[in-house]
Image (tube, rainbow, N blue to C red):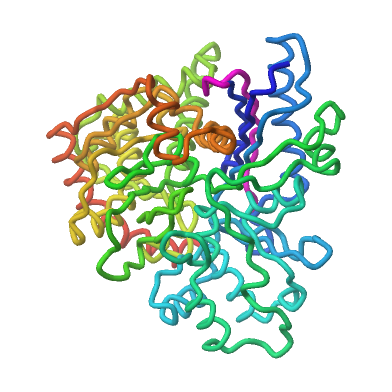
Amino acid sequence: MDKKLYLGIEFGSTRIKAVLIGEGFEPVAIGSHTWENQFENGFWTYSYADIWAGLQDCYQSLAAQYEAKYGTKPTTFAGIGLSAMMHGYIPMDGEGRELTAFRTWRNTNTGEAAAVLSEKFNFNIPLRWSVAHLYQAMLNGEAHVKDIAFITSLAGYVHYKLTGEKVLGVGDASGVFPVEDGGAEYNKSMIDAFEKGLPLSSTINWKLENILPAILNAGEQAGVLTPEGAALLDPTGNLQPGIPFCPPEGDAGTGMVATNSITARTGNISAGTSIFAMLVLEKSLSKLYPEIDMVTTPDGKPVAMVHCNNCSTELDAWVKFLSEAAQRIVPAAVTDKSEVYEALYRSALEGEADGGGLAAVPYHSGEHNTGFDEGRPLLVRLPDGRFNVANVMRTLFYSAFATLKLGMENITVKEAVKIDKIYGHGGMFTVRGAAQKLLAGALNVPVTVMDTASEGGAWGIALLAAYMGHEVKTLDAFLSDYVFKNQDGTTIEPDENDVRGFDKFMERFAAALRIERAAVDCFN
């Protein structure tokens, strides 16, 4: 078996995906496992049992595909990387035991803590960041806080269980607690402000800097697979310990790597259950914006991130509804999921430029960018609105991009940040040309989708595992001169009709947000 194989695994919001790449960086085997979050005891979560069952099933599907293609079971790799949904909160005690259920990025119950920390730090602390979850638990007087020995993200948690190392890549670490410029360490003045300037319980005997994961940069080694970790990842016993790991990263960072958008004036947009834009900056923003997170690339460059909790969930719900309706009328109607998505996504391109006078709000959960703690999915129309499949689908796409548009205007308009290119990736771009064209019109910028875009963050973290042992010194050079040298992509320029149509839709979206507020208050 060729040892120059690199395994990347990413825990997405609806799918765990594994990608195995060779020395040419092309995928040689892929595995996946579908899962869903649950709302339990007031928190959006995935159970720890589901985390491990999903990881094992995902890896076994990759191993089976590899064996079917090459006639042998994988036993070792040149490197492994782990990625997952950024932020969230997993606290553990001194024995490495989980103290609470995993609290995901989707939770919006941390408003009080985020506001206090943002004011104290003079730095935007989003609701989903780990330190916001930690301080909110402290404000709530939760019993587990006194027993904390370590907090981390989902990627850091799985990495710790597989390697024993309490570390994070700088990109993911910057969503746990703010980092210094350059990303080598956490911001010392903000740690001091947390320790000395906030009312902390006298029962707490830990220091913040001692419970945060250590920061590692792209290219560094972050431990090796332990015998216990090998048994967790592959209970069949075929996988051997000792495999080196790159630093675990968040899905935002791996998305930047997977789209070669880690240099200044580049950006990428990941569109799936959530949607976020990552814009690599030439200089710091002039002031604090509550809608903008300041994070980093996996090699420490400053990034302005606009993250929205809601994107494709409502769109997916309508696809399932229309598919079920078709099958009830014609039982032999197309049932292949990919064909259904292809047909309905493409129908959006046939809709009227403004969506036919319809409006939608896709909020299944709260949305901090527009001030919602909860969501109520809405589709609203006037009696003379042109209510047909094409217009509904276009309206749902527009609604998925609308909140992102509001946040990005702080960067592109108020701060006049120049972006030379935007790359799209994530599940919404699987149907070529549909989401890409509508997004280009919504943002009024060219949008490029690479041929590898569907591989997403799992491919991106596999690339970081390969970079860990590569001869080239900088991540920029590794991606540009090796990985993407011969990669093809498709760029779609904004269509003026789409631009004007989306602007008209945004007027209705602003009005629909007032309806959304009433729906949250009244429909409970």
Which residue is at 35% across, 20% downward? 488
**Left or right, 141 with reference to 448:** right
As for residue 35 lying within the magenta part, the answer is yes
Is residue 269 positioned above or below 337 on the image? below
Residue at 52% from the left image edge and 20% from the top image edge:
24
Q: Is residue 97 visible?
A: yes
Q: Is residue 178 left or right of residue 151?
A: left
Q: Quadrant of the N terminus?
A: top right
| Residue 473 percent location from the top left of the image | 47, 40
Q: Is residue 221 magenta?
A: no
Examine the rendered structure and indicate whether residue 290 appears above or below residue 411: below
Quadrant in the picture for residue 16? top right
- Residue 69, position as x, y percentages in the image: 68, 10
Magenta residues?
Answer: 23-38
Residue in front for this viewpoint, 218 or 7? 218
- 472 or 432, nearer to the observer: 472
Residue 94 position within the rendered picture, expressed as x and y whole percent measured from the top left: 81, 67
- Left or right position of 461 against 426: right
User: Is residue 119 positioned above or below 96 on the image?
Assistant: below
- Residue 266's image quarter? top left
The answer to which of 458 and 517 lies nearer the viewer is 458
Residue at position x 78%, y 18% from top? 73
Q: Picture quarter containing residue 512?
A: bottom left
Q: Position of residue 89 (x, y in %)?
A: 63, 61
Would you say 269 lies left or right of 165 here?
left
Image label count: 0
Asked if residue 384 shows in the view, the reply is no
At a point 45% along the width and 42% down the height, the residue shown is: 314
Q: Is residue 442 above or below residue 344?
A: below
